[in-house]
Image (spheres, rainbow, N blue to C red):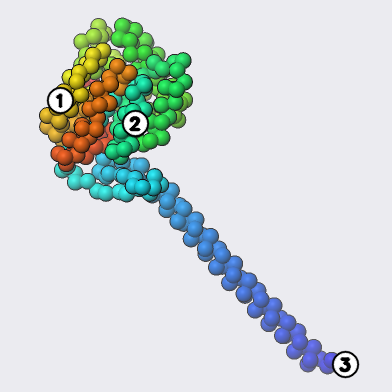
């Protein structure tokens, strides 16, 4: 029969074994926890980095490019002294929008689309609002109706139209658009009403408006040869630190599509950075608020 000392010795060995087992389990759990935390940290870094990338794009101090893998981005600093250009497309979406988006994607360029709401009843065009956003471009407001007589008839008609295009963009893309471009520009001579009233409505809602300072002579309702668009832009781009280029994105403007590759190539040859517009883009306004 076991004596008291043997019982104590056996109990001690059991306690020691259990302690060692618990220690081993704790070590394994600690290693697993470390690995999980490390993985979580990497994921958080990825999320933070993506958020950082998004914010640095709009600060206009960086260029973000995607190489072969759309999920892999390359961030490079731009010289603050380097001139910048912004391709902007008014009046779409249209049948030409997919062609423009294809070209921008091919050249890895982000642009800005000041869209209207004139695609009611055309579901294929309606989908383009989302595609614009999904491909990294800035979507902005250019009125819902683009009918000067109605749009500028009164502050109420302007605000109703503004709310309508803002809601359309939000419903289709989830983007709370903040940038607006007046049809005809803020200095237009079409409106019989004081433009300051309309500017005041924009500002009361936290929106800002942008005009342009590079215009290739392609007025609404007409089309000019592609080579004239190219020369009209390349002769002027770079005259300012920030060049906001006005192009039109309608079904009638086929020459815009034809000119776009040469415009992009020509701007890059001038060592000018092409960027999408944001709330931080320097303002170009024909008429400033009084």
Residue at x 75% of width, y 89% of height: 9
Can residue 271 be seen? Answer: yes
| Image quadrant assignment for residue 103 | top left
> Measured along the vertical axis of the image, is residue 226 above or below residue 156?
below
Per the image, the residue denoted by label 3 is 1
Marks 1/2: CA distance?
22 Å
Circle 1 residue: 232
Looking at the picture, tell me which residue is in the foreground, 144 or 88. Answer: 88
Could you say whether the residue bearing mark 3 is in a helix, strand or loop? loop
Front-most of 158 and 272?
272
Secondary structure beneath dot 2 equals helix
**Residue 139, percent from left and from top:** 35, 28
Alpha-carbon span between mark 1 and mark 3: 108 Å
Q: Quadrant of the C terminus?
A: top left
Q: Nearer the viewer, mark 3 or mark 2?
A: 2
Q: Are marks 1 and 2 in contact (CB under 8 Å)?
A: no
Residue placed at 21% from the left, 32% from the top?
Answer: 262
Q: Which residue is the site of mark 2?
A: 101
Which element is circle 1 on? helix
Residue at 41% across / 35% down in the picture? 134
Question: Which mark sits nearer the N-terminus, 1 or 2?
Answer: 2
């Amino acid at each position: 029969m076991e004596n008291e000392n043997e019982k104590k010795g056996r109990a001690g060995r059991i306690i020691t074994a259990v302690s060692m087992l618990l220690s081993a389990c704790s070590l394994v759990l600690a290693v697993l926890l470390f690995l999980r935390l490390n993985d979580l940290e990497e994921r958080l870094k990825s999320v933070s980095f993506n958020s950082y990338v998004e914010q640095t794009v709009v600060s206009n101090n960086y260029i973000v490019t995607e190489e072969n893998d759309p999920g892999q981005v390359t961030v490079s600093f731009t010289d603050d002294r380097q001139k910048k250009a912004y391709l902007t497309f008014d009046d779409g979406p249209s049948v030409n929008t997919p062609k423009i988006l294809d070209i921008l994607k091919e050249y890895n360029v982000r642009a800005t689309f000041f869209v209207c709401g004139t695609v009611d009843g055309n579901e294929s065009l309606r989908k383009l609002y989302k595609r614009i956003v999904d491909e990294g471009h800035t979507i902005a407001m250019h009125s819902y109706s683009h009918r000067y007589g109605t749009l500028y008839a009164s502050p109420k008609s302007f605000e109703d139209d503004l709310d309508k295009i803002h809601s359309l963009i939000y419903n289709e893309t989830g983007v709370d658009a903040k940038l607006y471009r007046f049809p005809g520009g803020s200095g237009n001579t079409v409106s019989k009403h004081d433009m300051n009233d309309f500017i005041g409505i924009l500002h009361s809602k936290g929106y800002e408006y942008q005009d342009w300072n590079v215009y290739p002579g392609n007025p609404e309702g007409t089309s000019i040869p592609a080579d004239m668009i190219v020369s009209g832009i390349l002769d002027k781009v770079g005259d300012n630190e920030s060049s906001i280029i006005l192009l039109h994105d309608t079904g009638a403007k086929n020459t815009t599509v034809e000119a776009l590759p040469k415009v992009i190539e020509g701007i890059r040859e001038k060592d000018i950075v092409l960027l999408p517009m944001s709330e931080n883009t320097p303002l170009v306004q024909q008429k400033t608020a009084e």
